[in-house]
Image (cartoon, rainbow, N blue to C red):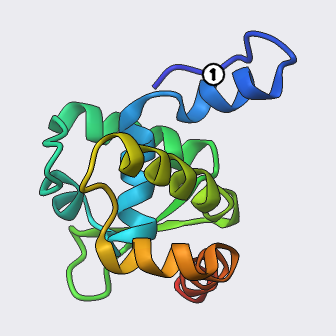
């Protein structure tokens, strides 16, 4: 994994240095919205991330404090990944990108989530974040 050095003082550029590739955001999406936490679960996502890219992105997300990695209680060779507060703070970003994508690429977001967001976006985002914090 390479060391990330900010290209400029621009906050958008800084954010993109960490989450500007699709794989990092999709891993965070899977953790935040699909309750995935293991390497195997991430591999089973429909986008079909390559094993070397998945390992690299999980390592980067851990190294820069977006996720933690713990040994699973049931199997010592299995690791569980959890979002940290830094990772949880990206939930509104993921939701907004998902909503934008739903407009231009239906069917878009899960219909239950989309309905909840249409009724109470802030409350739904807050509930997702609170649920993730309980599992930190």
Give the quarter of the image for residue 88.
bottom right
Residue at x-position 83% and y-position 19%: 10
The residue closer to the viewer here, 75 or 96, is: 96
Q: Position of residue 102 (x, y in %)?
A: 37, 51
Residue at x-position 49% and y-position 81%: 116
Relative to 42, is 11 on the left or the right?
right
Residue at x-position 19% and y-position 64%: 41
Q: Where is the C terminus found, in terms of image quarters?
A: bottom right
- Res 87 seen here: no
Q: Position of residue 45 (x, y in %)?
A: 17, 55
Note whether 101 is above or below 33 in the view shown.
Answer: above
- Res 57 seen here: yes
The residue closer to the viewer here, 101 or 44, is: 101
Kindly state the secondary structure of the residue where label 1 is placed.
Answer: loop
Note whether 28 is above or below 119 in the view shown.
Answer: above
The residue tagged 1 is 4
The residue closer to the viewer here, 37 or 102, is: 102
Relative to 2, is 46 on the left or the right?
left
Q: Position of residue 125 (x, y in %)?
A: 61, 74
Relative to 42, is 134 on the left or the right?
right
Instruction: Residue lying at the far right in this picture: please name it.
Output: 9
The residue closer to the viewer here, 78 or 34, is: 34
Give the quarter of the image for residue 50.
top left
Relative to 96, is 111 on the left or the right?
left
Q: Position of residue 74 (x, y in %)?
A: 23, 88
Note whether 76 is above or below 53 in the view shown.
Answer: below
């Amino acid at each position: 994994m390479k060391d990330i050095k900010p290209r400029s003082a621009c906050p958008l550029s800084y954010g993109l240095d960490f989450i500007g590739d699709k794989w990092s955001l999709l891993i965070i999406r899977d953790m935040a919205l699909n309750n995935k936490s293991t390497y195997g679960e991430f591999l089973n996502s429909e986008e079909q991330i390559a094993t070397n890219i998945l390992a690299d992105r999980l390592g980067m997300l851990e190294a820069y404090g977006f996720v933690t990695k713990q040994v699973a209680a049931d199997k010592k060779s299995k690791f569980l990944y959890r979002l940290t507060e830094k990772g949880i703070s990206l939930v509104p970003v993921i939701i907004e990108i998902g909503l934008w994508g739903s407009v231009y690429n239906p069917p878009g977001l899960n219909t239950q989530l989309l309905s909840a967001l249409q009724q109470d976006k802030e409350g739904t985002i807050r509930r997702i974040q609170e649920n993730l914090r309980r599992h930190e």
